[in-house]
Amino acid sequence: MTQPQQPVALVWFRNDLRLSDNPALTAAIESGARILPIYILDEALGGAARWWLHHSLADLAASFDARGARLVLRRGDAMEIIPSLVEEHGVGSVYWNRVYDASGIERDTALKSALRETGIAVQSFNGSLLREPWELKTKAGTPYGVFTPFWKSSLALPEPSLPLLAPEYIEGIAEVSGDHLEHWELRPQSPEWAVQWPQFWSPGEGGARTRALHLLENGLAQYSEMRDRPDVEGTSRLSAHLRFGDVSPRQLWHWTLDQIRRDDGRGESGGWAFLREIAWRDFNHNLLFHNPALATRNVKRQFDVFPWRCGAEADRDFAAWCQGQTGYPLVDAGMRELWQTGFMHNRVRMVTASFLVKHLRIDWRRGEAWFRDTLVDACPANNSANWQWVAGCGADAAPYFRIFNPIAQARKFDPDGVYIRRWVPEIGGLPTTYLAAPWEAPSLALTGAGITSGKTYPAPIVDHVEARNEALVAYRSLSNETLEGAA
Ligand SMILES: Cc1cc2nc3c(=O)[nH]c(=O)nc-3n(C[C@H](O)[C@H](O)[C@H](O)COP(=O)(O)OP(=O)(O)OC[C@H]3O[C@@H](n4cnc5c(N)ncnc54)[C@H](O)[C@@H]3O)c2cc1C
């Protein structure tokens, strides 16, 4: 029974939209307080991520309703909203799980001290990573800039703690005013590009569990071989669930180890390959934490003078890339998958990103911004770090002179053309041999497939060999000193 003097704890949700394995929520409940759960809109999110957020929040709000509390939605400055809720509702303590981007850290630090100055207890937790960025250091005491030693040193630490169970009952507080989710209009309106997405995605905690279970029970044994194949469902598709915290990496860690044990080792190599990817996510957060300007500034500063193309022609090529109209079927398939589903397979992300920065020599920041707006999993750490990796200017990056060949990549990773035919149906009638490079097809095959080059499907906007050579010339134009630093 509620005691009138029972304290109130405010729990601020951010990238942790779940009830299970939520250390901030669990600690608040265990303190014996009534709970005031709140979410403040992150205005910086891109369009696709806002769609995901809408559904994830709806799911979280329903979970709170079912347990006796109500999630409060607010819009505005957390530095004002939280202190005023504290005052209005007699809140004695505030809990949250940490974020790792520079502006979030700055805001949280300022809020923590402002609240503590007024006698409010504040506690923050790790709810989003296996290891926090300050837990792993090289022998020299510096942050890791290379993944493999980071991973090794992560494995040498004690196992991540066991995931926490979701509370069965949550004692809320009486009516607190808040916004209606619908009024935030988070789903894209014009154009309504996300109407088909419910057939691809089920944001929220239940959807994340279903996806995880599907991978663990059906795909773990093949994960290592299949994870690079965009034509099959060989990966978990959990990235947006992880981005918004529908599921925690700790849960995935322990569920995977459990599955490896249950499979009598059959899923062992796949299971560890999957956990390694989860650790890449940690590594990228570690990079973001130690390089606050990761989305805008080359980690290898030598690239600051790289001669990126700009002007009307570059703008035209950028538009062709965004629209999946480059004339390179694997690139176009990826860009169309992205637009139509809010997702793109990892292998194809690497190929499309490489095409933009190397074949088209367009600044990686333009590609990063497009992905940020169109990916449901768009994440400040993973998006920026991966773009810098592809561009060659990041920590532990693929060297700039290693240039993905979009034709060879298609033949290797989409051998039967299933992926290309799904997303570029206008060339689907071509024999598989020509699917990766339709311009190589004899006119008989083109006519047979109903293709008129440049009309039904664009001619390639650049020649692969020429573009590759020009990219290498541009790279070599950086001074020798610069190249030595970048290699
Ligand atoms: C240019 C570019 C941009 C990217 N932008 C993002 C982004 O904004 N958000 C994002 O979550 N991922 C991003 N990635 C990484 C990767 O493509 C996706 O995480 C992956 O495709 C998600 O599919 P999945 O969940 O089926 O992956 P799985 O293979 O099932 O992997 C499991 C999880 O591991 C993590 N992971 C997998 N690959 C990577 C990787 N290369 N780097 C970091 N973490 C990884 C993800 O959280 C993923 O959900 C990007 C990659 C590239 C090349």
Image (cartoon, rainbow, N blue to C red):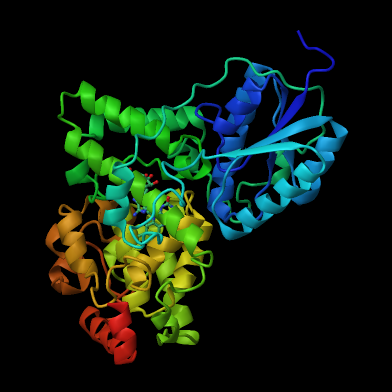
Residue 474 visible in the current orientation: no
Q: To which quarter of the image does residue 284 belong?
A: bottom left
Direction from residue 169 to residue 487 in the image, left or right = left
Q: Which residue does the image show at 65% across and 27% down from the upper left?
A: 28
Residue 305 visible in the current orientation: yes
Q: To which quarter of the image does residue 465 belong?
A: bottom left
Direction from residue 72 to residue 473 in the image, left or right = left
Q: Which residue is at the far right?
A: 88
Q: Nearer the viewer, residue 39 or 34?
A: 34
Could you say where residue 232 lies in the image, as x and y percent from the top left? 24, 44
Does 16 appear above or below 429? above
Could you say where residue 53 lies in the image, as x and y percent from the top left? 58, 43
Q: Which residue does the image show at 49% across and 45% down from the upper left?
A: 243
Q: So how many labels did they put on this image?
A: 0
Q: Which residue does the image show at 48% across and 72% down from the upper left?
A: 366
Does 86 appear above or below 171? below
Q: Nearer the viewer, residue 298 or 232?
A: 298
